[in-house]
Image (cartoon, rainbow, N blue to C red):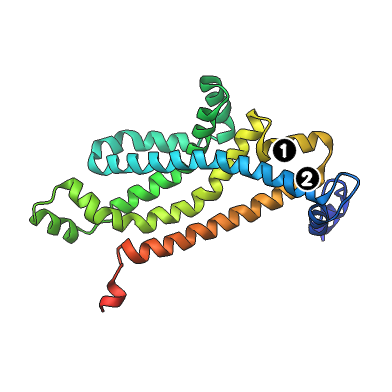
Amino acid sequence: MARHRVAQRVSPFIAKKPVDVWNYLTQDGLDGSAAQHRSNLLSLLWVTLGHAAIGFVFGVLASVLVSAIFVLVRPVEFMFMPIAMLLRTVPLLAMAPVIYVIFGNGLVTCALIGTIVVFFPLLVNVTLGLRSVSRQSADLVSVYGGNRFTILRKVAVPTALPYFFAAMRIAVPGAITGAMLYEWLFTFEGMGAAVQSAKAQGDYAQIWAVTFTVTVVAIALYMVATFIESAVLAKWGPNAGKATGS
């Protein structure tokens, strides 16, 4: 009942219903044609996806590399994992201005903000996955002359794939969030900047349309990551071939 009363007090000028967003995208109005709205959103989306891709790629590569170093050189993990976890507790909104002051406005700042969002979940999960190798499997590789790198490549990587993809499903929408934060704070392009501009102009229909579009795209990318996970694990995962071989 209390929530219903609060919802009634929110101005319809600000709080748009799903039908309002639908009309914004499909029907012409005083604020422009629906085709213009869709074209504008698509252009903004491509910019944001480009920024998200930069942070995502760098975040994945950095997390996998650091995780491998942690597993191969255990003292390095003892030294730097607590620091990484401490940095993870700092809100990204507080770290972003510091990154901007050091590196300025540009793709480096965009990459670092996106990398931070992607890096930490993957680092923890991949490191845990690489350390989940059974002692029997490691001993078997060692008996046949394999070293620690061979164990990592032949046994640890397939074992870590489920952990890797579990973190990837979180990292994909997280990269979009990081890209929008970068755009909202430091640029005049992309969906993050569009939210800021639309708010200044009182165009709340566009804000909700951006929110709807980002949500749909994030869910779609999450599903794509899930499908890729299923295909990769079926071929290279720790249980690959067991169902057919039994």
Q: How far across and down, in percent of the image, does residue 140 sit?
A: 13, 59
The answer to whether residue 28 is left or right of residue 163 is: right
Dot 2 surroundings within 10 Å: few (below 14), some, or many (20 or more)?
many
Q: Is residue 97 above or below residue 26?
A: above
Q: Residue at x 53, y 26 (%)?
A: 99
Q: Residue at x 29, y 37 (%)?
A: 78
Answer with the quarter of the image where residue 230 lies.
bottom left
The C terminus appears in which quarter of the rendering? bottom left
The N terminus appears in which quarter of the rendering? bottom right
Near-viewer residue (146 or 80): 146
Near-viewer residue (102 or 33): 33
Q: Residue at x 83, y 46 (%)?
A: 14
For residue 194, the mark is 1
Q: How many discs appear? A: 2
Answer with the quarter of the image where residue 158 lies.
bottom left
Q: Earlier in the sequence, mark 2 or mark 1?
A: 1
Q: How far across and down, in percent of the image, does residue 175 sit?
A: 54, 44
- The reply to whether discs 2 and 1 touch (Cβ–Cβ < 8 Å) is yes
Q: Residue at x 42, y 38 (%)?
A: 85
Dot 1 surroundings within 10 Å: few (below 14), some, or many (20 or more)?
many
Q: How far across and down, in percent of the image, does residue 4 sit?
A: 83, 58
Q: Is residue 196 above or below residue 29?
A: above
Q: From where the camera sits, is residue 117 visible?
A: no
Name the secondary structure under disc 1. Answer: helix
Q: Is residue 232 above or below residue 77?
A: below
Three-letter code for the amino acid on which mark 1 is drawn = Ala
Q: Which residue is mark 2?
A: 206
Q: How far across and down, in percent of the image, does residue 54 sit?
A: 50, 38
Three-letter code for the amino acid on which mark 2 is drawn = Gln
